[in-house]
Image (cartoon, rainbow, N blue to C red):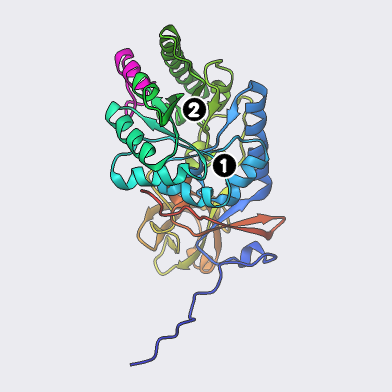
Amino acid sequence: MNEPVRNLKPPVLARIGDRVEDVGTPALLVDLDAFDHNLAQMQALADAGGVALRPHAKAHKSVAIAQRQIAAGAVGICCQKLSEAYPFAATGIASIHISNEFVGADKLAMAVELARYVDLSICVDDVRQVAAVAAAATAGGVRITALAEVDVGQGRCGVDSAEALIRLADAIGNAPSLRFGGLQAYHGGAQHLAHWTRRRDAARRAAEQAHDYVRLLHARGIACPVVTGGGSGTAEFDCESGVYTEIQPGSYVFLDGHYGASEWPGRFQPRQALFLSATVMSTARAGVAVCDAGLKSVAVDSGLPRLWSGPGSEWLRYVAANDEHGVLQVLDENNQALLGSKLWLVPGHCDPTANLHAQYVCCRNGRVAELWDIAARGLSR
């Protein structure tokens, strides 16, 4: 039996200074010019509306990106899972909102530990969650901000009655180890309506429902310091609503295929910044090309990736994703010349696609300029 080769590792994907065409594939590429444009536009939108920007880190899972968002003016970040917050907390990001409910002893322990190092806020939609978090926070000697989640159209989490909201607010207010932070009012379905006017109308309805809940709290003498929610698709409407004090867009830094197919005639006009590079690895069958980016490289929950650039991109269609293979239909040309070609694909959904990779390869002027680790990949507890 051969001795193990303990230092045997695969080669790096890319090095700073490499030509983009020499980057190994599959790889997540970030166009830094487009990324910087998107970053600045969203921050300007929030600033103009007098609204705090708390970007959602679940979209990118990268400390490097979160640090750039905060440097540009963001007040902190959102995470969807407690474990996801750890890499960000460990590198000094001071304000983290967990925009999701959680139950279980392991989750409570994580919340208490995180609250020792960051200004932590969480979501609740049941008084039993409040009791459990309060007890854990008391035992751990920390204080946690709790926001009541209200359903403003998503139909998933969040209370949907005045009585339930008051019970939540009272339970939080009566717990010395908790502070009532306000409302989580997120309508995810509104983000992905392709037509701008439909997104606007859905966002306005969500804001009206959130406003009704705020007035209910005020009538009971309960201050509501924060109303947080919204996302990339509705940010411009949420900022002008007069209801939201904070917005939580995430995908705006990248603009994936799903968002890229939407209308953007308003004040926020993002550019495509995220791409998946792939190499054509087989042309054995007539009318077919096969690339090396399949299900382990790109999420397909929001549709198959589409071709952005590369030889023949105008007459190629990505038609099927297998574990390690992306099958391309060759519409008009001979496929033989494609072998070894590099293609740029636009992922349908950036969040789960990022979770499949370890690093972003960031490019400017045809060269690799930076490498950003995806430190929170796989952290879904």
Q: From mark 2 to mark 1, how far is it between C-alphas?
A: 22 Å
Amino acid beneath label 1: Ala
Between 201 and 123, which is closer to the camera in this rendering?
Answer: 123
Q: Which residues are magenta?
A: 151-169
Residue contact at pointers 2 and 1, CB within 8 angstroms: no
Q: Secondary structure at mark 2?
A: loop
Mark 2 vs mark 1: in front: 1
Q: Quadrant of the N terminus?
A: bottom left
Is residue 107 a member of the stretch shown in magenta? no
Position of residue 352 measured from the top left corner of the image (x, y, whole percent): 42, 48
Category of crowding for the residue at label 1, using alpha-carbon neighbours closer than 10 angstroms: few (below 14), some (14–19), many (at least 20): some
Which kind of residue does numbered mark 2 sit on? Gly
Q: Is residue 25 above or below residue 220?
A: below
Quick one: label 2, few (<14), some, or many (20+) residues within 10 Å? many
Label of residue 205 in the image: none
Disc 2 designates what residue?
Answer: 230
Residue 127: x percent and y percent?
Answer: 29, 26
Residue beneath label 1, please?
94
Looking at the image, which residue sits at the far bottom? 1
Q: Residue at x 48, y 18 (%)?
A: 224
Give how far across and how far down residue 21 sits, in percent. 62, 64
Q: Secondary structure at mark 1?
A: loop
Question: Residue 171 occupies which quadrant of the picture?
Answer: top left
Q: Would you say residue 304 is visible in this rendering?
A: no
Residue 156 higher or lower than 253, as above or below: above
Q: Nearer the viewer, residue 213 or 325?
A: 213
Query: Looking at the image, which residue is at 36% across and 46% down?
Result: 109
Q: Choose top left, top right, bottom left or bottom right for residue 13.
A: bottom right
